[in-house]
Amino acid sequence: MVAQMLYGSACMLLNEEESRQLEDEVTSPGGATAAGLSVLDKADFGTVLKQAIDATNQRADELMLNYGQN
């Protein structure tokens, strides 16, 4: 169920839908999704996710440079 939810969200975003618009469409005020998003916001999930993506990209770049030297 979670995989299908993520797949559906990814498809909507790939079709140029704005993430904030998608969030508004699936979040009922005071509902379950709103509660989960509140926890993610309090934990600064967006910043942590960006840091993880940046670290991944940096390491991939380093590995590609090393690969080119061999």
Image (spheres, rainbow, N blue to C red):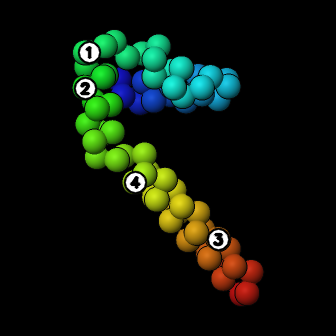
Residue on which the image places disc 4: 48
Numbered disc 2: secondary structure:
helix
Numbered disc 3: secondary structure:
helix
Under mark 1, the amino acid is Gly
Residue 49 location (% of width, % of height): 44, 51
Residue drawn at the location 43% of the way across and 51% of the way down: 47
Going from the N terminus, do you reach mark 3 or mark 1 first?
A: 1
> Looking at the picture, does residue 14 appear above or below residue 22?
below
Under mark 4, the amino acid is Val
Single out the mark in the foreground, 3 or 2. Answer: 2
Residue on which the image places disc 1: 31
Under mark 3, the amino acid is Asp
Residue on which the image places disc 3: 61
Going from the N terminus, do you reach mark 4 or mark 3 first?
A: 4
Residue 35 location (% of width, % of height): 25, 26
Residue drawn at the location 54% of the way across and 61% of the way down: 54
Label 3 – label 2 distance at C-alpha: 37 Å
Res 11 → quadrant = top right
